[in-house]
Image (cartoon, rainbow, N blue to C red):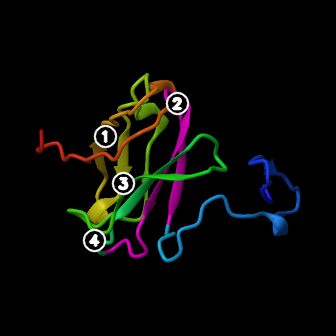
């Protein structure tokens, strides 16, 4: 993809040197992962902070298409653990309706999984989500 056109549709290119960005967050783009949430017909982007070894926080973003437009679902500048090298929402670890995905990340250099419950506002089919609270298994 080269860029988004004035009509909101992607403009494609076969030239690698002409590719464009679909997401930008200056000073925060470290490692990014995107997964399709079929139950909500949305895409989820997970992104750790600029330094995986400290508690720099992370963000979760959503979009109707893999090229955007991306909106912030959850963003924090600090968290209870260092976010690690990566974070993602594996599609096999999502509920059938999509409202309960699991965040998999490498916090504090460990294999970490946290259950996420998306509280949906309005039409569930569109997947509009309000801010969420990520809970540790001991925080029920």
Query: Circle 2: is it few (<14), some (14-19), or many (20+) Cα within 10 Å?
Result: some
User: Is 47 part of what is drawn in magenta?
Assistant: yes
- In the picture of the structure, the residue carrying the numbered disc 3 is 105
Residue 125 horizontal side relative to residue 115, left or right: right
| Rendered image quadrant of residue 14 | bottom right
Residue pointed to by mark 4: 55
Instruction: Classify the position of the C terminus by image quarter.
Output: top left
- Sequence-first disc among 3 and 2: 3
Q: Of tags 3 and 4, which is closer to the observer? A: 4
Quadrant where the N terminus sits is bottom right
The first of marks 4 and 1 along the sequence is: 4
Numbered disc total: 4
Mark 1 highlights which residue? Answer: 116
* Label 3 neighbour load within 10 Å: few <14, some 14-19, many 20+: many
Which stretch did the figure color magenta? 31-53
Residue at x 51%, y 69% (from the top left corner): 29
Task: Give how far across and how far down residue 31 sits, in percent.
Answer: 50, 64
| Residue ID at (64%, 46%) | 66
Q: Earlier in the sequence, mark 2 or mark 1?
A: 1
In three-dimensional space, the C-alpha distance between marks 3 and 2, rounded to whole angstroms, equals 26 Å
- Residue 70: percent from left, percent from top: 56, 52
């Amino acid at each position: 993809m080269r860029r988004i056109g004035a009509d909101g549709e992607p403009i494609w290119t076969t030239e690698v040197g002409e590719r464009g960005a679909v997401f930008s967050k200056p000073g925060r783009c470290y490692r990014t992962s995107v997964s399709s949430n079929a139950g909500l017909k949305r895409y989820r982007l997970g992104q750790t902070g600029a330094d995986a070894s400290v508690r720099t926080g992370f963000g979760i973003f959503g979009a109707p298409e893999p090229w955007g437009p991306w909106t912030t679902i959850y963003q924090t500048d600090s968290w209870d653990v260092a976010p690690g090298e990566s974070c993602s929402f594996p599609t096999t670890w999502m509920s059938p309706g999509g409202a309960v995905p699991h965040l998999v990340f490498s916090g504090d250099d460990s294999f970490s999984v946290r259950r996420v419950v998306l509280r949906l506002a309005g039409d569930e089919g569109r997947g509009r989500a309000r801010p969420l609270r990520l809970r540790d298994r001991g925080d029920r």
